[in-house]
Structure formats: structure tokens, C-alpha cells
Image (cartoon, coloured by chain):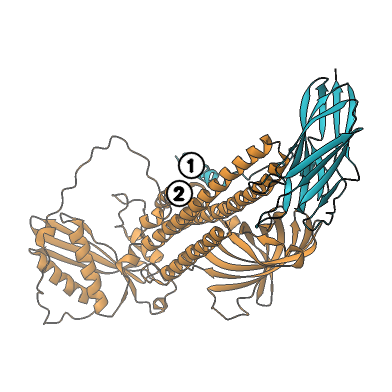
């Protein structure tokens, strides 16, 4: 009799002292998280940074991202690529220089493995610059030949404020496209 | 969330304050307290009138007659008569009684007298037989351990006559002459009491072994906090325990609801984070995840604190229920240790070994912090303190060894950094009650000095406790302060000062 009561006591104590809610356990290890790319903000990078294998003839999209950039009103993004392996098909603007309903002004040119993307934010009465981590532009490309094609921003790349002063950027991110047959 | 946290903390403090105040007032209540240290013992005139046993009359009638007899003696101011509530707090099962639980033999009556710490005990019987009443009784001297006076009233035919005769009897017992003017007092009492209720003879299909009252009280309080106290006629204390647990339970429900909200938010954001591949959105999700995780931790810590507090009070309630329940003599109560067999030799029990040790559960919150923690916000955490009787006297200051475990948690305002862990402190407790007269001896004053081991460093803890001891049982409530001086590997040298409340029990 007494033993069963003792067991009951132990059971109640277990209920009181051991049952608990879980603490939230998490790891912020998403491979696309800029915090996990080893970048020093503010900077710009490619997303995704690496295409592991794209077959010749296939197309894909590479995004030109800015990371914790402040008060940018325009950008000249010069990208160097291997034109024997990669063919740039189209460039589209991203969300970074969108200003409400106003789309950014954008024009591009490419020559001898260099792509120039010029982006300008259209100011409104309430906003004349943009800040944050967002896509500035999207490059649609096609793989022409097999091989490793590094892709990088050149030193001519610059972001400017609404006063036309250049915005300091830390070392840029690099990209790599692995084209296979 | 911080606002909700403040409300919870205020509510917790209010709850504890109410419980604290309640128990203080309960302690002050004479009806609840049996003051065995009463000065009356010095006069040698303390007298207890045991409930008369009866045959043929109803129990309410018996109680009424006993109480009137008790009051009559009291009014004569010869003896200091114990109230019924005090007298009935002692209930023993003495061997050799014909009816289990009755106390008619001389030895049993003397035993009760000793437990009640009175000098005299009056015990008797009221019998109704063919509409005639007979009263027999004896007065025992506990000091002399013998009968000093016997009395009887025979063949009384009306209940009012019994009352008159018992009034006369009170003069006899007090050693006074019965005044001639003593006449029959008008009575408005209903004579319907005379008819004894025929107790239904229930068929007992299942006979359970008799459970000692202490164990029964413990069982009741184990299931429902305070129930054992109510069973042991300590209703206010029982209600206090029950109410305190209800308040803690309510706070826990509130905290759990907040926890659930935070947990829901955390799960949603974290799932999105794991599945998302847009760096911009991932960057936005990061602080949300950290904030929700921090919130769940904060609410969970608060829940843990409440659980420690609730569990401690529940445990204290069980212990208290066991202590205040009436003794059953000659009942083997297993390991509980305090039940005394008067014929057996004294032996060391578990209780004796644990005597002097104490446990306090606490809720504590930093209120001041050093420069290296200035960017962090503190949270309310829980902990516990084990006090020991191991110590030395330095003059009038008793210095004892104690061990404290206390959690701490700080989070940066952007929720992206946190500093938390637990400290294990071996400390010396200096009892300064004799040195500081403020608050009297019920309010014990301790200073605290210890060496601590933290999750990422070592340091010292200084502090003080103001402990209010509930005199009728080994429960205490305390306000405590701690200054933590820590040399950490992550923040360097730092410090914080915490204030807390705790509730504890000390094994008498």
C-alpha cells in the first residue's frame, strides 16, 4: 500500500519537475544566406555563387545581388565572363531599384566577355534611393561550350548615391559556372 | 513581448506577495496557531476538557454539552481552559481501547494531556438510557499522572437539567462552592438533538487497511495542495497553499500561451528559412528567427521558474500536511520517522539525518549590470539553494555551508547575441539575525559569500537574504539579492546584480 503511494509521489514529482517545453534550437545554415557566404557588407555578389553543372545548350539565371547596401540611387555593374563558354541572352532588372510603381531605368551592353549593366532609380517625392539586400538585376545566359567559366565584377563596377557620390563596397563576391556536355 | 514579460513578472511578484501576506496573516491568527510556548504553562493551571464520549445521544448534542461544560469552567477563571479547536488538534490511537480511535483509558488520557502540554485533563461519558441521563467523569493531573477527582450525575430526566447539573459540576471541578442562586437557565436549544441519528450500518464489502492520519493527510495534499491541511483542521493554511498553486498555475498557463505563440512564430519562420533560396528574404528571416527563439527561451525559462516555485510549494505543502496532521501512536508509518512508539528505543531516522537541511526555490532577475553587458537585456530566471546545518559559530553569528544553482540569461537588443548559462556556487551563509535586531527573530538576516563556477568563467557571488520563517511549520519566504562578479571568456570581466524572491522549506 505504502509502496504504491510512494510510486505515485515519484510520478507526481516527475510530472512537476521534468516535463517542460522545448527551447527553440536552430542553425542558420542556409547555403544561400549571405551571412554564410563569407562576405563583408556592404558589397555585391552573384546568386547563386556557383552552378555545379549545366549542360551545354541549357539556359539559367544568375542574379546580381547587393548585400546591406545603403542609399544607392544608381549602379554600373561591369561583369567579366568567359564568352567562349557563356552567352548572355537577356538582362532584366531586379527589385532593388524599384521605387514603388516606378521601374528602374536600365540599359546594357556587352563586348569581348564584358557585360555592362547600368541601373538608375527613378526618384519620387518620398524616396530617392534604395537600401538593403536585394537583387539588382537578373542575367539569363546559355551555355555554349563545356568548361569552368568564372564570373566576376570588375573594378569599374560602382554604386552611386543620389548625389552621385560612389558608395564604398567591400570585396565583391565571385561566381563560377561549370558547363558540362 | 517585453511588456507581456513585465506584466508576468509583476503578476508573479503580486502572487508571491499575496501568498506571503496571506501566510503572515495566517501565522498571526490565533485560531490557526497552537502556541505551545504559552506562559500559561508556568501557572500549572492549564486544563483541557476532552470531548465526552456518548451513548444514546446525538453527536451534536454531545459536542454542545461538552463545549458548555468547557465554557462554564473557563468563566470561573480558576483554570486556563484550552479551546475546543486546540484540544481537538491532538488525536491519538492508543492501544487497548475497545473502540479504535477512542481515548478512555487513563494512559491514553495522560498521553493526550502530555501532547497538549496541560496540567489537568477532564474526560467523561454521557449516557442516555430510557430517557434518563447519566454523566460520569474524571479529572486527571498530568503532572502527578493520576486521577485527582471523579464525578457523576445519575438519573437526570431532562436535557436542561443536565445542563444545569453540568454547570454545577464545573464549580465542583474548579474547587468552588455551587452558588445557591444557580437556577435553570432558559434554553432555546432544540431538544430534537436528543434523538440520536441512527447511523446507517453500511455493509463493508471491502475493508481497506487503516491508513495513519499523517499519511492520509500527506496523500490528500499530494493530490490536491492544501487538502491535507483542511483534513487536519488547518483550513486557512490549506486554502493558502491551494490559492498559491492556483495563482502559479494561472501564471504558468499565461506563460505557456505566450510560449505557444512564440513557438508557432519560430516554427513558421524557421521552416521558411530552410526552404527559401532568395538571399534578400533569408536576410529578413534571420532576425525574426532569433527573436522568436529568444522569446520561446524567455517564456520557457519563466515556465521553468514557475515550475520550480510551484513544485517547491507543492512539496512544502505535502511536508506541511504530514507535519500538522495529528499523530497516531503505535502506528508504523514506514520511513517517515517522526511517529513515536513510546515503548521502543530511540533510533536514528532518515528525518534525524536530514534535520537542519533546507531547500529554497527562487525566481531571480538582474536589475543592474556592468558595462560589458550594457547592450544586453536581462531575463527572469530560476534557481535553487540548498542550505545545510554544517557550520560554525563566530560569536553569535552562525556561519553555515550552502550550495546555490542559479540561471542567468541576457540577450542583445537586436536578438542576435545572447549570454546565458547557470552558476554553481558554494557559499558561506552568515546568520546575522542576532546582530541586526530589525524585524525580530522571525525575520532572519543572512549575508552570502561564495565562489561560483559559470558556464564560461569563474567568479564570486556576494549577497544577502531576508528570510521570514513561518513559525508553525518550516516554511520560509525570502527576498534575496546577489552580486555576481565574473571573469568570463566571452565578455571579459563583468558583473550584474540580481534581486529575487524565494520560498523554502527547512527540515526541522
Chain of the residue under the numbered disc 1 shown in the image: A
Residue sitting at x 92%, y 32%: A112
Asked if one can make out residue A133 in the rendered structure from this viewpoint, the answer is yes
- Residue B396, image x and y in percent? 65, 77
Pointer 1 local density, CA inside 10 Å: few below 14, some 14–19, many at least 20: some
Q: Is residue B420 above or below residue A155?
A: below
Residue ID for mark 2: B222
- The chain coloured cyan is A
Chain B hue?
orange
- Residue A26, image x and y in percent? 68, 42
Q: Are marks 1 and 2 on the same chain?
A: no
Instruction: Point out the image quarter for the C terminus of chain B.
Output: bottom right
The residue lying furthest to the top in this view is A181
Residue ID for mark 1: A8
Query: What kind of element bears circle 1?
Result: helix
Front residue of B123/A15: it is: A15
- Residue A166, image x and y in percent? 84, 54
Residue sitting at x 16%, y 48%: B198
In the rendered structure, the answer to whether residue B403 lies left or right of residue B157 reads: right
In the rendered structure, the answer to whether residue B45 lies left or right of residue B323 reads: left
Residue sitting at x 53%, y 51%: B258
Asked if one can make out residue B324 in the rendered structure from this viewpoint, the answer is no
Task: Answer whether labels 1 and 2 touch (C-beta < 8 Å).
Answer: yes
In the rendered structure, the answer to whether residue A120 lies left or right of residue B209 reads: right
The quarter of the displayed image where residue B362 is located = bottom right
Amino acid at each position: 500500500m505504502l509502496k504504491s503511494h510512494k510510486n505515485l509521489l515519484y510520478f507526481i514529482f516527475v510530472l512537476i519537475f521534468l516535463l517542460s517545453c522545448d527551447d527553440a534550437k536552430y542553425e542558420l545554415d542556409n547555403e544561400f544566406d549571405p551571412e554564410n557566404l563569407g562576405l563583408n557588407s556592404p558589397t555585391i555578389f552573384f546568386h547563386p555563387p556557383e552552378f555545379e553543372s549545366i549542360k551545354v545548350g541549357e539556359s539559367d539565371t544568375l542574379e546580381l545581388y547587393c548585400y546591406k547596401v545603403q542609399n544607392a540611387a544608381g549602379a554600373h555593374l561591369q561583369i567579366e565572363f568567359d564568352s567562349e563558354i557563356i552567352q548572355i541572352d537577356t538582362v532584366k532588372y531586379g527589385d532593388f531599384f524599384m521605387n514603388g510603381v516606378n521601374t528602374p531605368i536600365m540599359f546594357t551592353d556587352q563586348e569581348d566577355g564584358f557585360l555592362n549593366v547600368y541601373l538608375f532609380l527613378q526618384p519620387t517625392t518620398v524616396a530617392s534611393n534604395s537600401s538593403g539586400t536585394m537583387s539588382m538585376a537578373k542575367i539569363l545566359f546559355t551555355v555554349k561550350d563545356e568548361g569552368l567559366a568564372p564570373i566576376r565584377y570588375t573594378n569599374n563596377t560602382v554604386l552611386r548615391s543620389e548625389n552621385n557620390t560612389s558608395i564604398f563596397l567591400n570585396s565583391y563576391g565571385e561566381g563560377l559556372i561549370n558547363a558540362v556536355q | 513581448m517585453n511588456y507581456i514579460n513585465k506584466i508576468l513578472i509583476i503578476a508573479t511578484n503580486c502572487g508571491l506577495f499575496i501568498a506571503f501576506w496571506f501566510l503572515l496573516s495566517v501565522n498571526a491568527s490565533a485560531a490557526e496557531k497552537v502556541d505551545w510556548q504559552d506562559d500559561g504553562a508556568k501557572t500549572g493551571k492549564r486544563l483541557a476538557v476532552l470531548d465526552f464520549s456518548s451513548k444514546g445521544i446525538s453527536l451534536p448534542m454531545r459536542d454542545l454539552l461538552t463545549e458548555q461544560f468547557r465554557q462554564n469552567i473557563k468563566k470561573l477563571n480558576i483554570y486556563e481552559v484550552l479551546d475546543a479547536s486546540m484540544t481537538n488538534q491532538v488525536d491519538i490511537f492508543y492501544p487497548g481501547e475497545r473502540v479504535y480511535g477512542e481515548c478512555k483509558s487513563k494512559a491514553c488520557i495522560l498521553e493526550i494531556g502530555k501532547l497538549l502540554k496541560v496540567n489537568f485533563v477532564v474526560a467523561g461519558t454521557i449516557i442516555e438510557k430510557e430517557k434518563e441521563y447519566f454523566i460520569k467523569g474524571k479529572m486527571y493531573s498530568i503532572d502527578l499522572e493520576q486521577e485527582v477527582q471523579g464525578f457523576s450525575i445519575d438519573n437526570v430526566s431532562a436535557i436542561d437539567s443536565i445542563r444545569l447539573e453540568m454547570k454545577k459540576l464545573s464549580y465542583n471541578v474548579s474547587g468552588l462552592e455551587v452558588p445557591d442562586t444557580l437556577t435553570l437557565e432558559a434554553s432555546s436549544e432544540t431538544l430534537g438533538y436528543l434523538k440520536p441519528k441512527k447511523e446507517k450500518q453500511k455493509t463493508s464489502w471491502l475493508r481497506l487497511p487503516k491508513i495513519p492520519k499523517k499519511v492520509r493527510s500527506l496523500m490528500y495534499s499530494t493530490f490536491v495542495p492544501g487538502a491535507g491541511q483542511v483534513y487536519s483542521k488547518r483550513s486557512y493554511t490549506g486554502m493558502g497553499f491551494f490559492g498559491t498553486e492556483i495563482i502559479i498555475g494561472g501564471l504558468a498557463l499565461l506563460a505557456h500561451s505566450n510560449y505557444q505563440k512564440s513557438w508557432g512564430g519560430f516554427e513558421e519562420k524557421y521552416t521558411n528559412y530552410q526552404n527559401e533560396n532568395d538571399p534578400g528574404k533569408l536576410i529578413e528571416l534571420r532576425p525574426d528567427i532569433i527573436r522568436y527563439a529568444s522569446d520561446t527561451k524567455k517564456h520557457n525559462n519563466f515556465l521553468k521558474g514557475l515550475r520550480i516555485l510551484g513544485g517547491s510549494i507543492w512539496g512544502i505543502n505535502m511536508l506541511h500536511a504530514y507535519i500538522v496532521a495529528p499523530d497516531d501512536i503505535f502506528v508504523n508509518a514506514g520511513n517517515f520517522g517522526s511517529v513515536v512508539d513510546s515503548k521502543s528505543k530511540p533510533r536514528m531516522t532518515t528525518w534525524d539525518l536530514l534535520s537542519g537541511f533546507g531547500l529554497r526555490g527562487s525566481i531571480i532577475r538582474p536589475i543592474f549590470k556592468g558595462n560589458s553587458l550594457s547592450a544586453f537585456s536581462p531575463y527572469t530566471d530560476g534557481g535553487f539553494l540548498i542550505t545545510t546545518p554544517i557550520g560554525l559559530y563566530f560569536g553569535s553569528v552562525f556561519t553555515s555551508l550552502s550550495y546555490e544553482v542559479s540561471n542567468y540569461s541576457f540577450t542583445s537588443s537586436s536578438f542576435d547575441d545572447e549570454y546565458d548559462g547557470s552558476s554553481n556556487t558554494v557559499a558561506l551563509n552568515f546568520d546575522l539575525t542576532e546582530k541586526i535586531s530589525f524585524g525580530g527573530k522571525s525575520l532572519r538576516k543572512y549575508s552570502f559569500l561564495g565562489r561560483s563556477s559559470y558556464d564560461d568563467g569563474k567568479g564570486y557571488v556576494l549577497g544577502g537574504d531576508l528570510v521570514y520563517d513561518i513559525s508553525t511549520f518550516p516554511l520560509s519566504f525570502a527576498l534575496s539579492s546577489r552580486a555576481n562578479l565574473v571573469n568570463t571568456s566571452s565578455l571579459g570581466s563583468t558583473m550584474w546584480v540580481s534581486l529575487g524572491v524565494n520560498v523554502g522549506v527547512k527540515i526541522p
